[in-house]
Image: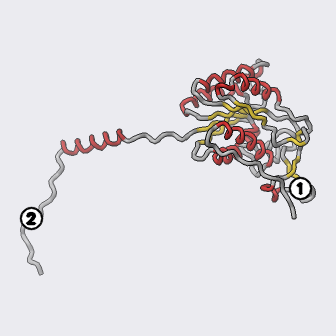
Amino acid sequence: MRPFSSTPISRPRALRPRFVTAVILLALLGAACLPVAPQPPTVVVYGDSLSSEASGQLDNQLQTAFPGWRVIVRSQGGAALCDFKSNMQDDANLEADLVIIQFSGNFFTPCTNQRSDGYFFDTAWAINLWHERNTPVLFVGGLSRVGQPASIGTTGGVYKWWAKQTAAWGTRFVDASTFLVEDGIYKQTLPCYASEEESCTADNDRINVRSSDGFHLCNTPGSGGLGNMPCPDYASGAYRFALAIVRAAAAMIPGAIIPSVPGPVTYR
């Protein structure tokens, strides 16, 4: 056994205050010099109840079309474009790389009640706002009710006109009815996609694409957009509405993945 030593054990000296201060300063300076992680590219969607109902589909499909992008959907049932002016101004710091604007033509809110031509001038305002930030804008034409001829609606006409006038700024227009009409008419049901085989009715291989109110997209009226929530269950109309928008959006951005259109369901 090693004999016990009476020599006191030396302990490390306490760090001098000046040395501690220097270490802290160097650490802070080093942290300050670290590069700030860049924000991911961003796409922002503004819309009314249709965007609310399709928000889940828009988010999923946009994330697939734009891998690594941040997707922000701002929507409000019954809202008009002018209701989102302050939101758009606040969102300027997001440095969005793409903005999508969808409003069907609601006239329920105070900013539209006394302005029959409000959408015309509000569309111009939005284009100028985002052009100042070098952000391209995609406008989405509205839908008509079941049984009516295919149409982009009044606001769609305004959007399409302005998109043509400012095409050099990167403004574009998409007809959201692309996958919601048959023989030139808005239909309550349409042939199922192969991806929707489990949701198809067995008798005619068709699927419901509009709410029973003939306008909205969720299977049950008020279960989605009117409550400013995505459809609670799979809704083919919301999927098709989002598909038309995302395909057009992806075509605007180099390197984006344009989603394919599913083929029809087939049975053996």
Residue 205 bears which disc, if any? Answer: 1
Q: Is residue 154 above or below residue 60?
A: above
Rendered residue at 89%/55% (across/down) = 205
Q: Quadrant of residue 114?
A: top right
Depth check: give the residue in front, 214 or 205: 205
Depth check: give the residue in front, 218 or 248: 248
Q: Tell me if 209 is positioned left or right of 118 in this view.
A: right
Residue 56 location (% of width, % of height): 69, 46
Q: Quadrant of residue 238?
A: top right
Check disc 1 and report its element: helix, strand or loop. Answer: loop
- Which is more N-terminal, label 2 or label 1? 2
Rendered residue at 35%/39% (across/down) = 33
Q: Which residue is mark 2?
A: 8
Residue 153 location (% of width, % of height): 83, 29
- Which quadrant holds the C terminus? bottom right
C-alpha span from label 1 to label 2: 91 Å
What type is the residue that disc 1 sits on? Asp
Residue 103 seen? yes
Disc 1 packing (10 Å; few <14; some 14–19; many ≥20)? some
Residue 85 bears which disc, if any? Answer: none
Residue 5 location (% of width, % of height): 8, 72
